[in-house]
Image (cartoon, rainbow, N blue to C red):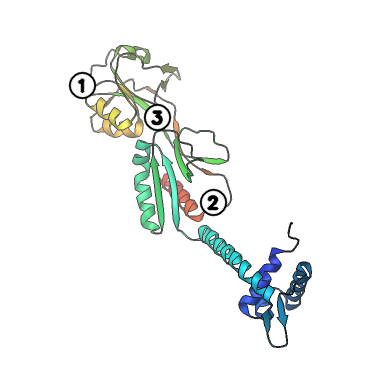
Amino acid sequence: MAANYSLDDLRYFCTIVKLGSFKKASADLGMSLSTLSRRIRLLEQTLQLTLLNRDAHRITLTHTGELYYDRYRKLFDEVECIEQALCDEKEQPTGKIRISAPIYMGKHFLSAIFCEFLLQYPDIQLDLRFSNNLIDIEKEGIDIAFRVRNPAIEDWVIRKLKLTHNLLCVHPNYDHQSITHPEQLKDHPKVTCLGLAPWQLKNQQTSEEYSFNPNTHVRLEVDEIQMMKQAVESGVGISYIPDYIALPLIEATKLKRILPDWKSDGQPFSILYRDRKQIPYRVRLLIDHTLQHFTNV
């Protein structure tokens, strides 16, 4: 049978017993003494039981009151602990943050940010999941995800951090003078990376767009950018390399760019987090820390 009494009134009852008087309980609960007395009388009338014996100097529990108090005080103590934990989560920089990011981009752009954050907040732990696979971030309980391009994920906020472009690169000693258009790449050895095909290119001078599918004369196909970079540095073939990797190597003369008028459109590197008002404080701190870093770059 459904209970028709108020749990609030039971909590008031437990507070009276715990503090030993109606006066102290009314002050603790922030209500008038007359209102508190009325609520307890209403509770007893609803239960058709007497819970408290009252006299001019003190209150005592009836036998039934002892049974109710022993059972419900544990419940309200647990609720109080839960409420305190939730309050701490909102206001204290503590706890664990679960993060997902692509392997090489995560290492290249995020490692220093994460280490700096951990040094600033010693009571926060980061659980990093570096993977090139698009994991189910809801199922895995991810708090913050970093992604290339902008996937449509319901109820998640997507904030663009930076744009990256892919460039065509080869070993400096490779004879590439005969290549004047991306369609001619089919006759040359290539190094490809899963997730980076087809090679979408746009001429920055003429705005011509060309989609090249590197499916012929492929010397090496990998699923990790670091190995792709190393293969091109070694002279294995031509590849389509993110600019944040290629440009420092071009400047150091370890790679050479071919078809310099051609590159991909900008691919957004973004941070994703749940669209909700009550984001845990620790998660909000890391989001703000990351956004601030990319704003200053």
Disc on res. 279:
2
Horizontally, residue 8 falls left or right of residue 116, namely right
Determine whether 128 is above or below 229 in the image.
below
The residue under the point 36% across, 30% down is 242
Instruction: Classify mark 1: residues with Cα within 10 Å, few (<14), some (14-19) or many (20+).
Output: few
Secondary structure state at the residue bearing disc 3: loop
Residue identified by numbered label 3: 165
Q: Earlier in the sequence, mark 3 or mark 1?
A: 3
Label 2 to label 1: alpha-carbon separation: 53 Å
The residue under the point 37% across, 44% down is 110
Residue 24, position as x, y percentages in the image:
65, 79
Q: What type is the residue that disc 3 sits on?
A: His
Q: Earlier in the sequence, mark 2 or mark 1?
A: 1
Instruction: Classify mark 3: residues with Cα within 10 Å, few (<14), some (14-19) or many (20+).
Output: some
Q: What type is the residue that disc 1 sits on?
A: Asn
Q: Give the farthest residue toward the bottom.
A: 57
Name the residue nearer the viewer: 20 or 108: 20
Instruction: Classify mark 2: residues with Cα within 10 Å, few (<14), some (14-19) or many (20+).
Output: some
Residue 130, position as x, y percentages in the image:
38, 39
Name the residue nearer the viewer: 217 or 23: 23
Q: Give the farthest residue toward the front.
A: 63
Disc on res. 173:
1
Label 3 to label 2: alpha-carbon separation: 32 Å
Q: Can residue 155 be seen at all in this image of the molecule?
A: yes
Determine whether 101 is above or below 262 in the image.
below
Q: Can residue 297 be seen at all in this image of the molecule?
A: no
Which quadrant of the view contains residue 104?
top left
Which quadrant of the view contains residue 147?
top left
Label 3 to label 1: alpha-carbon separation: 24 Å
Secondary structure state at the residue bearing disc 2: loop
